[in-house]
Image (cartoon, rainbow, N blue to C red):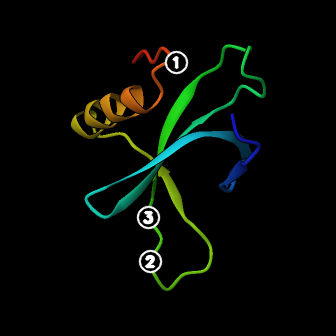
């Protein structure tokens, strides 16, 4: 896993994630992130969508919540990461 970290900040908390993989679909950038610091550690994975505009210097990510979008992206990330087992919960 690459050492790139991202932080999501809202009014109540800051969440830190580690980037596992990224892809682009229909012009949108997506990140597969985990809360596990180590490759050997089991953790939860999330798919984030970059919602920022092309002219913005900071990225703005949101959790993907649409079931159809999640299903399609999980298949793509599973193909990209053939050594990782992704399960939807």
Looking at the rendered image, the disc whose residue lies closer to the viewer, 1 or 2, is 1
Q: Do the residues labelled 3 and 1 touch (CB within 8 Å)?
A: no
Q: Which mark is residue 53?
A: 2
Q: Quadrant of residue 9?
A: bottom right
* Helix, strand or loop under label 3: loop
**Horizontal side of residue 41 vs 34, given as left or right:** right
Q: How crowded is mark 3: few (under 14 residues within 10 Å), some or many (20 or more)?
A: few
Image coordinates of residue 34 in percent, x first then y, are 63, 31
Q: How far apart are marks 3 and 2 (CA)?
A: 7 Å
Say which residue label 1 marks. 84
In percent of width and height, residue 81 lies at 48, 27
| Label 1 to label 2: alpha-carbon separation | 31 Å
Label 1 with label 2: CB-CB less than 8 Å: no
Q: Which of marks 3 and 1 is in front?
A: 1
In the picture, the quarter occupied by the N terminus is top right
Quarter of the figure with residue 41: top right
User: How many residues crowd around disc 2 within 10 Å: few (fewer than 14), some, or many (20 or more)?
Assistant: few
Q: Distance between the residues labelled 3 and 1?
A: 26 Å
| Residue lying farthest to the bottom in this orientation | 55
- Circle on res. 51: 3
The answer to which of marks 1 and 2 sits earlier in the sequence is 2
From this view, report whether residue 84 is shown above or below residue 45: above
Disc assigned to residue 31: none
Left/right placement of residue 61 relative to residue 18 reads left
Q: Residue at x 54, y 40 (%)?
A: 21
């Amino acid at each position: 896993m690459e050492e790139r970290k991202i932080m999501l900040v809202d009014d109540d908390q800051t969440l830190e994630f580690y980037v596992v993989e990224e892809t682009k679909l229909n012009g949108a950038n997506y990140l597969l992130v985990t809360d596990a610091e180590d490759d050997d550690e089991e953790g939860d994975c999330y798919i984030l969508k970059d919602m920022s505009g092309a002219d913005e210097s900071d990225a703005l990510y949101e959790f993907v919540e649409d079931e159809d979008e999640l299903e399609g992206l999980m298949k793509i990330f599973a193909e990209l990461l053939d050594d990782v087992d992704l399960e939807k919960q």
